[in-house]
Amino acid sequence: MRAGDLLDESLAGLVTRPGRTALTILGTVIGLGALVATLGLSRTASNRIVGRFDEVAATEIQLTSRPQALGEIDPALPWNGPSLIRRLEGVAAAGNTTAVDTGDALIRTAPVRDPIRQTEFRLAVQAVSPGLFEAIHADVANGRLFDEGHSARGDRVVVLGRTAAARLGIATVSNQPALAIGDDVFSVIGIVEDVTRQHELLASVMIPEGTAAADYRLASPELLLVETDIGATQLIAQMAPLAVRPDAAHVIKVAAPAEQRRVRDNVESDLELLFLFLGGISLLVGAIGIANVTLVSVMERTGEIGLRRALGAHRRHIAVQFLAESATMGTVGGVIGASLGTLVVVGVAAAQQWTPVLDPELPLLAPLVGAVTGLVAGLYPALRAASMEPVDSLRSGT
């Protein structure tokens, strides 16, 4: 049997039952489409996750002062550290933050003690510079943030994190609420809903560092937080001590993130493995569909198989014909599935405003995978058809 005759016989077997053939191909389309889509979405999602990871974790530098040795120069961070480090190219934002020691003072919003409910709380008080809000990407839910003027004048104003505001029962600043830290009364001017770093500030009461220096004798900042542009972190980490303390750069301790490539690679591989597993299950369902339909086709065409064997067809001709039919269904399903899977990846990425990422060889390999899947799925039905004896086939087919 020539290859052309084999192809004609295979196409004839598929065309004579178009509905069943279409439904069988649909299973392969779903399987390979899901495989292409899931792998593409996993690569797109991991690219998005890695991008977000780089934006937050890989762009942060923390500067603190080293412990002072006997007779050593004062290692304190300067108050104007944020403005000094902002001169460096590649620095996006910078700000100070310091824990304020308020002793045994509790924080309350009610002017009188209520015996029914708790009105005094022990909350962390943080002295921050206005630039810190930009460095941590503070999202203001209500009111406003304090500025350099508040800090320079030592104004008694506070900004609350959402957790601290909820504990104090403050939901809005429209009624000009106030709170007391011990005996000192402060005006609440804003509530921060969320931050991208330094999440402990959401449970804190934040006051201007100038106010903390005046009222609580704060000597120097405790931490200088720096946000850099992507790719500039390591260079800024090397130059930051000299920029902040040119007289004694060695007293400044720098904490910069290490290379995160291994972490990013682990995230990508885990996502790809998960989606590959899901796509493989879908492909397995499609292969079972092809095997089932091909086996049913063998049972229905028993008489045809017996007649062809009686006319001189060999066992291999029968086996190859059914293998060709199943491989054709798998190939067609692979082409359509790869196209639909690619469209799904592009559509989801466009809807989420992501950048679609898809391996270029994946859609090209999908038809080949479909053909191999069809061959494997049709192997048992083809062998069963080839093993039929002509007399038995003709007797059962009549």
Image (spheres, rainbow, N blue to C red):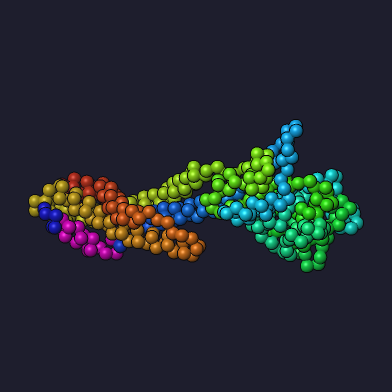
Tell whether 321 sits left or right of 333.
left
Q: Residue at x 80, y 47 (%)?
A: 218
Q: Is residue 74 magenta?
A: no
Query: Percent from the top left, x then y, of residue 324?
Result: 21, 53
Tell whether 383 sits left or right of 145.
left
Q: Residue at x 89, y 58 (%)?
A: 111
Q: Is residue 14 visible?
A: yes
Q: Residue at x 25, y 63 (%)?
A: 17
Q: Is residue 395 visible?
A: no
Query: Percent from the top left, x then y, of residue 82?
Result: 67, 52
Tell whether 109 sits left or right of 47.
right
**Snapshot quadrant of residue 145:** bottom right
Q: Which stretch appears magenta?
A: 6-21
Query: Percent from the top left, x then y, of residue 35?
Result: 39, 53
Instruction: Please tell me whether residue 74 is drawn above or below residue 208 in the rendered image.
Output: above
Query: Percent from the top left, x then y, of residue 211?
Result: 80, 54
Instruction: Please tell me whether residue 237 is drawn above or below residue 328 in the rendered image.
Output: above
Foreground residue, 216 or 266?
A: 216
Instruction: Tell me the chief SS of the magenta region.
Output: helix
